[in-house]
Image (spheres, coloured by chain):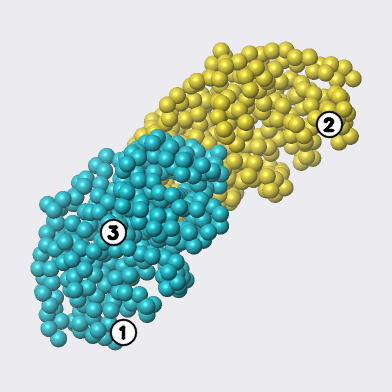
Chain colours: A yellow, B cyan
Amino acid sequence: MSTLTSREWRLKLRPIGMPSHDSFELATAEIAAPGDGEVQVRNHWLSVDPYMRGRMMDRESYVPPFQIGAALEGGAVGEVIASNDPGFAPGDMVNSMAGWREAYVAKPADVMMQKLPAAGLPPQAFLGVAGMPGLTAYGGLLRIGQPKEGETVFVSGAAGAVGSIVCQIAKIKGCTVIGSAGGADKCAWLESIGVDKTIDYKAVGGGQALTDALKAAAPKGIDVYFDNVGGDHLVAALDAARVGARFPICGMISGYNATTPEPGPWNIISVIPKRIRIEGFIVTDMADMMPDFIRDMASWIGAGQLKYEETVNEGVETTLDAFLGLFKGGNTGKMLVKLV
Amino acid sequence: MSTLTSREWRLKLRPIGMPSHDSFELATAEIAAPGDGEVQVRNHWLSVDPYMRGRMMDRESYVPPFQIGAALEGGAVGEVIASNDPGFAPGDMVNSMAGWREAYVAKPADVMMQKLPAAGLPPQAFLGVAGMPGLTAYGGLLRIGQPKEGETVFVSGAAGAVGSIVCQIAKIKGCTVIGSAGGADKCAWLESIGVDKTIDYKAVGGGQALTDALKAAAPKGIDVYFDNVGGDHLVAALDAARVGARFPICGMISGYNATTPEPGPWNIISVIPKRIRIEGFIVTDMADMMPDFIRDMASWIGAGQLKYEETVNEGVETTLDAFLGLFKGGNTGKMLVKLV
């Protein structure tokens, strides 16, 4: 057993507004051979996800904030190099929260380390379609959105890691699906995976134009709105909602870098006459759905009913730009960094 | 059988902003003897309710708008004078939607006429505690709010017809109850009926001061927010909510007379980390709860566990001012007009 050299991204300052390179540094660490009960891992794939922006702020939330001077954290898939834990052997492929770095040594429980299930999927799929974003889509849509055959489902951030899976599960469930994404290329891709109608919100613009575009796409209204974006998209969805609509609120990326709060939805009063249910959720609440999720996803992917796209950066040094790209619409499907 | 002379309030113009007398007129109509299948009724009590403001606007909603030149409608309790319907006999006390007038003749189904149940309550109770506002409180709190023993329930508009019943049902269910109302008198009354803590929002002010007052009253946070008010109250409730909170949205009276939309809740993103469920409802959705509701209310009132207050105007000519008073905090408990 020997040490490994690892480059890792650390938080230098808490960013205000849209983060820049000034708030981060790429440092080098020596990763010791594993001590008692520890496992040493070389990461192959890193995940960047919008929720990480929240952890850069010093506030109480469902996950603790990142610490100044410490390495950032996030989903990662890697290979066990050396192990003093009987549950892990060299060569095992593992999922953990020890991302933003090339290698690490830790007790498995401290980094939520798990062996990848044997589901016939490539390892990086467990950071996307078969991992946290996939379960977010599956649990949020099915448990909270409760789509019924023949209903209309509207998805914002539809070309993202979560949104693109929501769209396809809704299609599998027999719904008409409307997806909003930024740019003609993303909209064309969404149509290629079966989305019925797309809205290029960058071309349409916000405010009433977005509402008008949604109402044109869904003349009878929408029954489910899966929200990844917030802001004008939520306003449009409230306006287009039918009686009894369900709104699983997964994310509101339009506000994550705001320095003053985004205005709330001025038409929230619509929830009364339309009996709308708006419900926020966190993927960890859906942990009990994991067995059904892995089974269904493996089946749907195997049958060609569900496709997934990845946007891949290469090298740990590109991780920060991959993360920043999330807020500029830089990704179609899951944004990943390939290390090995 | 003979005709009756009836004064009735008609809509002259659709009001913009806070309504004034200019938009209404008090007219006199001759009420014919009942034709085939018709019933002639003299009203004893009229109800005025905040939702009526919405029906003064020409827009699609869950109830059709009032028509210009026609009498307004609303809950009323009266006595059958003459009947050509075998289901109703002279002397019967009936509930209907033919309010804002002294008398009427109609087919029962056209005005939702029903005989008052024999529940040992005075007739006007069927416009309040045992009628639409009571069922709104009962169904909204129990079905959507789902309060559990030991939880904390926050109610805005707590001294109103709906809010004051919500507060007391929440107490009966073993909750800590915080009520917001305008003025020291209303707060004192709420405390006299068992509300644990009150917030005089007129004294406190809005914005962050209201949030601070709520957090001081509920240092561990709130589990249920029953919303009658919207605006700053909804913002404060989002800020004070605990994980898993439920928000039955009954009304948003703070915005009913706004000429430009009130700002939406800027902190709506809180629904995600706190997994809050916001759900609008309409009392007619709760019709299936009516038998349980009448049974429970009669039992709680009989046992002295639930008290109700009425603010009573006298004479049909005072109906408009009673209605306008709802938006100025003119009522404690149910606002009624007594005719006979």
Same chain, marks 2 and 3? no
Marks 2 and 1 sit apart, C-alpha to C-alpha, by 79 Å
Name the mark nearer the viewer: 1 or 3.
3
Task: Classify mark 3: helix, strand or loop.
Answer: loop
Please rate how many residues cluster around mark 3, counting C-alpha atoms within 10 Å: few if below 14, some from 14 to 19, many from 20: many
Locate residue B145, reporting x and y percent. 49, 55
Please rate how many residues cluster around mark 1, counting C-alpha atoms within 10 Å: few if below 14, some from 14 to 19, many from 20: few
Q: Which mark is residue A238?
A: none
Q: Residue at 9% x, 68% y: name it.
A: B28
Please rate how many residues cluster around mark 2, counting C-alpha atoms within 10 Å: few if below 14, some from 14 to 19, many from 20: some
The answer to whether A230 is drawn above or below residue A338 in the figure is below
Q: Residue at 77% x, 34% y: name it.
A: A109
On screen, residue B289 versus residue A45, left or right, reads left
Instruction: Kindly identify which residue carries mark 2.
Output: A92
Residue A26 visible? The answer is yes
Instruction: Kindly identify which residue carries mark 3.
Output: B49
- Asked whether the beta carbons under mark 2 and mark 3 sit within 8 Å of each other, the answer is no
Q: Residue at 74% x, 20% y: name it.
A: A102
On screen, residue B16 versus residue A34, left or right, reads left
Name the mark nearer the viewer: 2 or 1.
1
Locate residue B14, reporting x and y percent. 18, 51
Locate residue B248, reporting x and y percent. 45, 53
Locate residue A150, reporting x and y percent. 51, 54
User: For the residue marked with disc 2, what is the amino acid?
Assistant: Asp
Q: Chain of mark 1?
A: B
Q: Quadrant of the N terminus of chain A?
A: top right
Q: Quadrant of the C terminus of chain A?
A: top right
User: For the residue marked with disc 1, what is the amino acid?
Assistant: Gly
